[in-house]
Every structure is written in structure tokens, then in C-alpha cells.
Amino acid sequence: NGGKGFCRGQEDYGFIGNSVGTDSTVPIEIDMSGHVDSKNFSKISVAMGTVCGLHATSNKMYCWGSRWSGAMGDGVGTPNQLTPFEIDMMTPLGITNSFVEMSNTFGGACGIHTNGKTYCWGYANAYGAPLTGDNSQLPIEINMRNNAEENTFAKLGDMGRQSSYWNTCAIHTNNKAFCWGGSWSPAFGDGLG
């Protein structure tokens, strides 16, 4: 369909992204009205309650669905977002919304910016190093202070399918894997749980 995004299923939280608010058993085109960008996406990531998409030509990241825990990156927890919301990187960080990779998790998201750095917000920040340790509802840069490596990741894990809702994993440009978030599940592979 020329890169157009479609969603279907249960419409809890508005994650079908068409502002209708009802369940659908057939795919429904994502509503991008009100945005300069067309309906073409290069990637869509689905997690419980929230969907995010990376636009095919502008590289802007959009999210919709539940705003729980700062999933939209704007510091607002309610109401649910029924249509795509453009992630605001300018207000908290002074940079444009331009990503080469993204993924989302339950109540949060991360993206690799075109400047080469990785940023996260919401529950993607929760519980942990190498981040600031708070549940920031605004985008913040990953802090690699406990590691010798710079904040230069090549790939983000499919956070919506990982073993815990509150973990984030990524592959560094040096091919090492890093994870952060809640370590009470075996997601880190360090035997600590």
C-alpha cells in the first residue's frame, strides 16, 4: 500500500489511530490528518496500549494510544491519544524530531536520532541505568556513564516483544548488546533477576 500504515484490533486507548474509538477486525488506515506528513511509514512498533511509527520521508516519530507513564513524550498522562502525535524533541532538548530507528514499550519509547544519539521517554526510562534513574515523561538522552562506550547505538530491540514491559535493549555500533530498565525479570541475562 505504498508504505501506508494500517492497524486493527481492540481499540482500547486509541491505538488503532483513526480517532473513531471502536474495535475493528479489518485493517484501518492510520489517520494523519492535521499533519504535514503523508500516511507513509517505514516502521511501526506495537506495544501494549501504545503504537509508534517512523515516517518514511520526514523521519519524524509519531505515537498514539495510551498516554500512561509519558508514552507520548510530552509530560501529559491523559487523555488517550486517538490519532498520531508528533514527538516533541525541540522543547526538552532543542533538537528536531528526526530518527533513523525507533521502538516502543508499555508506556514509553526510544529512538536513535539522526544525530547518532539514543533518546528515551516514559517507562522506557524507568528503573534504571544507564539512564537518569527516573521515569522521565519527556525525552532524555541515554547516559552511558557506567560504560566506556559512547551513546552510539545501531539498532533497538523490539521492546514490545521483550520479556519485560519495562526493559529496553539495544545493539551498540561496536556490536555489544546493552539493556536497561527493571531487572526483576531475566531480561538482562546477568543471572540477577
Image (spheres, rainbow, N blue to C red):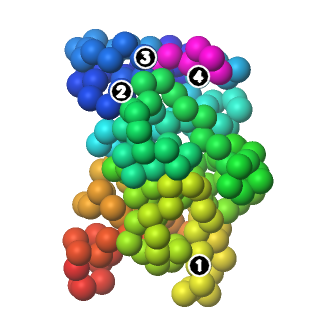
At label 2, the amino acid type is Gly
Q: Residue at x 62, y 81 (%)?
A: 149
The correct choice, above or below, for 85 with respect to 2 in the image is: below
Mark 2 surroundings: few (<14), some (14-19) or many (≥20) residues within 10 A:
many
- Which residue in the structure is indicated by mark 4? 40
Q: Is residue 155 visible?
A: no
**Label pair 4/3, CB-CB below 8 angstroms:** no
| Residue 83 appears left or right of 187 | right
In the depicted structure, whether residue 151 falls above or below residue 79: below
Disc with the residue nearer the chain's start (2 vs 4): 2
Kindly identify the residue that appears in the image at 29 percent across and 42 percent down: 48
- Disc 1 on helix, strand or loop? loop
In the image, residue 188 lies in the stretch drawn in magenta:
no
Residue type for callout 4: Asn
The picture places residue 114, in percent across and down from the top left corner, at: 72, 51
User: Who is closer to the viewer here, 72 or 32?
Assistant: 72
Report which residue position mark 3 lands on: 18
Q: Position of residue 85 (x, y in %)?
A: 55, 32
Q: CA distance from mark 1 to mark 4?
A: 34 Å
In magenta segment, residue 34? yes
- Predominant secondary structure, magenta span: loop
Lower sequence index among marks 1 and 3: 3
Query: In the image shown, does 127 or 39 lie closer to the viewer?
Result: 127
